[in-house]
């Protein structure tokens, strides 16, 4: 990781850098973090690190690790199901509101183009594209639909949870055939939105998110015995 410049918002910089590393898997589940190790890694003092670690702990990205400090929280299938259940409702609402705005003429041309561009960019990515790019494209598409809804509360609520989703999205995006299937589903969502079909837009969005959440949770559960076995090998 690159060292950070000393600035007034140093706590935010440390928080954001650590959050990004957790979300993309650079800092893996179970990895131990101490004020000293993070400060050395980022080239900053311990004070901003201490504050940033506590914020990440409150957000559920870090957990206590006895007297040894903190560690990156594991990705739990139950938590993923809970998060996706909430996102299913919000994605459905966003799609319905977006379709309403298109039909009423309140959606701007720029908003529509942003969603269309996000869809086109995602569909252009091949299965061999880096996983990080596949995740970014997926997030960009859904974020564009959220923005098209015109409801800032949806945008802000989901944006705050994207790091949790990013941690697990690679589990399904890396599966053979999943990329094309998901982007076909994205296309169906946007087509309904741009047609002003509120009911279809909501149905497509909810179905897509519900299926992605369940598939992610199931893959996490399938990995559990392997994880347990690997932990046992180290003891």
Image (cartoon, helix red, strand yellow):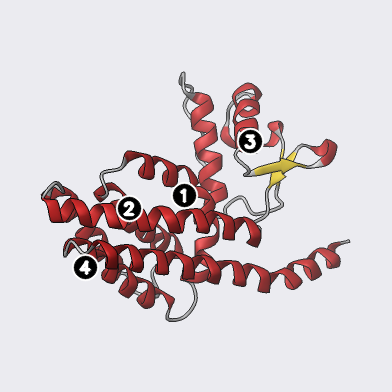
Callout 2 environment at 10 Å: few (<14), some (14 to 19), or many (20+)?
Answer: many
Marks 3 and 2, Cα distance to the nearest angstrom?
28 Å
* Label 4: which secondary element: helix
Can you tell which of label 1 and label 2 is closer to the viewer?
A: 2
Query: Could you say which is closer to the camera, residue 206 or residue 119?
Result: 206
Q: Which residue is mark 4?
A: 191
Marks 4 and 2, Cα distance to the nearest angstrom?
14 Å
Q: Which residue is mark 2?
A: 94
Can you tell which of label 3 and label 2 is closer to the viewer?
A: 2
Marks 3 and 4, Cα distance to the nearest angstrom?
39 Å
Label for residue 58?
3
Marks 1 and 3, Cα distance to the nearest angstrom?
16 Å
Marks 1 and 4, Cα distance to the nearest angstrom?
24 Å
Callout 3 environment at 10 Å: few (<14), some (14 to 19), or many (20+)?
Answer: few
* Label 3: which secondary element: helix
Which label's residue is closer to the chain start, 1 or 2? 2
**Residue 199 in which image quadrant:** bottom left
Marks 1 & 2, CB-CB < 8 Å contact? no
Q: Quadrant of the C terminus?
A: bottom right
Label for residue 162?
1
Marks 3 & 2, CB-CB < 8 Å contact? no
| Residue 78 image point, x, y percent | 65, 59
Q: Residue, x 35% and y 54% (percent of image)?
A: 93
């Amino acid at each position: 990781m690159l060292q950070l410049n000393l600035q007034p918002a140093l706590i935010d910089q440390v928080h954001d850098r650590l959050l990004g590393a957790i979300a993309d898997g650079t800092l893996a589940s179970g990895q131990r973090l101490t004020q000293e190790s993070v400060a050395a890694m980022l080239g900053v003092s311990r004070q901003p690190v201490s504050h940033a670690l506590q914020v990440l702990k409150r957000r559920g990205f870090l957990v206590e690790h006895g007297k040894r400090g903190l560690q990156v929280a594991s990705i739990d299938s139950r938590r993923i199901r809970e998060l996706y259940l909430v996102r299913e409702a919000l994605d459905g609402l966003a799609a319905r509101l977006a379709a309403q705005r298109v039909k009423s003429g309140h959606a701007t041309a720029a908003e529509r183009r942003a969603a269309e561009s996000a869809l086109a960019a995602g569909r252009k990515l091949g299965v061999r594209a880096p996983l990080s790019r596949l995740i970014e494209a997926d997030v960009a598409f859904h974020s564009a639909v959220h923005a098209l809804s015109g409801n800032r509360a949806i945008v802000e609520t989901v944006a705050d949870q994207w790091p949790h989703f990013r941690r697990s999205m690679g589990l399904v995006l890396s599966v053979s055939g999943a990329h094309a299937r998901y982007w076909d589903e994205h296309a169906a969502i946007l087509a309904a939105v741009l047609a002003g079909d509120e009911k279809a837009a909501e149905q497509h969005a909810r179905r897509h998110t519900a299926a992605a959440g369940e598939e992610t949770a199931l893959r996490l559960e399938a990995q559990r015995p392997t994880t347990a076995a690997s932990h046992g090998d180290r003891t």
